Image (cartoon, helix red, strand yellow):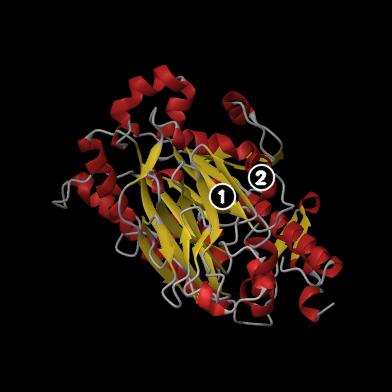
Amino acid sequence: MSALVTRDFDSLVVDRVDEGRFSVHRDAMRDPEIFELEMRYIFEGTWIFLGLASQAPNAHDYFTGWIGRHPVVVSRGADGTLHALLNTCRHRGARVCQHAQGNAKYHVCAYHGWAYDSTGRSVYIKDRKEGCYSDAFDAEDHGLVRVPRFEEYRGLLFGCLNPRVHSLEEHLGEARIFLDLVIDQSPRGVELVPGCSTYTYKANWKLQLENGLDGYHLTSTHPSFMRIVERRKSGESKNRLNALDFLLHEFRGGFTFDHGHAAVWSQNPTPEVRPLYPSLGELRARVGELRAEWMLNSRNLCLFPNVQFAENASLQLRTIRPLAVNLTEMKSWCLAPVGEPAEARELRLRQFEDFFNPSGLATPDDTTCYEDCQTGNGARIVEWQQGYARGMTSVRNGANEISESLGFRPATSQHGAYAIQDETVFHSAYREWLRLMKAGAARAAARPGEAA
Ligand code: FES
Ligand SMILES: [Fe+2]
């Protein structure tokens, strides 16, 4: 067994909530060796969000992505079936799709011309007859390798390289309610508004994972956004954009779920600023009063390890792709109900670009802080974070009255004043992190030759 496999992961997470202690060792944020193991045991060991089925609506449409270090293409065959394939030519490895998305009946490798159909089947090996190939070569399958597990939840596509992983349904578990609150915003579901913002930040991927649930940073990291909203309201600014005023929120809460997922929410005292608000009557009739009201609340859902649905200033889908221990690629899309009226779509886009992305008023504040954390975490003799303690004495195991009213069973529940700004919502991700790292190491020890 190599040293790379035998790291004592239990020494990196202190999980003794009954004693009031939960902490994460800073090596999890800064150690390149741990990063390598995260790629193998987490990103190549559990379910990874790939995209929406509606990104490839027609026969032969495709889009590309990643599962850990594995380039992937999701392609729709002639019969309408979706396929998740490893985007690497069987000949000598070149990617067969270089574009983010497109339509191609055949994928022809640019290097030596091997070709594959939209299901990944090998259809052409250039100059095969003249190639003096052996019987052993002819006996092999030359098609693109399939992602071992590929499943869908209501139009959301996930893949997994670990063939023995639990089902996607089990993976998502009770967190599905927060997906339903997004997907059910129109009878026809949600879609990505065309256009994707891609950017990198020079820090660990888990900083984004945490920040998606971090209510504590809002007033200290984003005061410029708060001031701009105030100036618009007072008439001091000529910009009349109706943006969510976070300072009006009074209550908030959070839930954690099995398999590392968590969600935070805050009640929205000004639901009329939402582009969804004019649809309230239709929503109430279709999903009921309570769920319709919840669709207008602010909700951030983090599905471990790589996707976040953030509905606060606007509705954003973002994916996290770790590139190195101190480098992360983000992709960000505006999500919208299918069939939304034009005025609502316009307001949605203006709110989206106001707050999110490198050109927005919030994202640069956040990524600057992540990079500063990465720099500060370079102080090697400081070992443990103190950032997982807020809310510890008010969180409870299992459901609370809010989850019961909505009909789901979280692992933990938290509810209280807006200022609690709970940090116990981070715990589930580190519990899953530890579980997967230990399970991956056990697999590697049992079968040293296997990839994950
Ligand atoms: S690498 Fe694709 S045909 Fe050679
Ligand atoms: Fe932020």
Q: How many neighbours does mark 2 have within 10 angstroms: few (below 14), some (14-19), or many (20 or more)?
A: many
Q: Are marks 2 and 1 in contact (CB under 8 Å)?
A: yes
Give me the disc on residue 205. none
Q: Nearer the viewer, residue 311 or 418?
A: 311
The C terminus lies in quadrant: bottom right
What is the x, y in percent for residue 364? 37, 66
Horizontal side of 72 relative to 164 (left or right) equals: left
**Three-letter amino acid code at the position of disc 2:** His
What is the x, y in percent for residue 165? 72, 51
**Three-letter amino acid code at the position of disc 1:** Phe
Mark 1 lies on residue: 158
Q: In this view, does 406 lie above or below 378?
A: above
Give the residue at x 34% y 58%. 196
SS for tag 2? Answer: helix
Horizontal side of 329 relative to 245 (left or right) equals: right
Mark 2 lies on residue: 171
Q: Nearer the viewer, mark 2 or mark 1?
A: 1
Q: Who comes first in sequence, dot 2 or dot 1?
A: 1
Mark 2, ligand 2, within 8 Å: the answer is no
Question: Does residue 91 show up?
Answer: yes
Give the residue at x 54% y 54%. 84
Q: Residue furthest top?
A: 285
Q: How many marks?
A: 2
Horizontal side of 103 relative to 80 (left or right) equals: left
Q: Which residue lies furthest to the left in this view?
A: 238
Question: Does residue 421 show up?
Answer: no
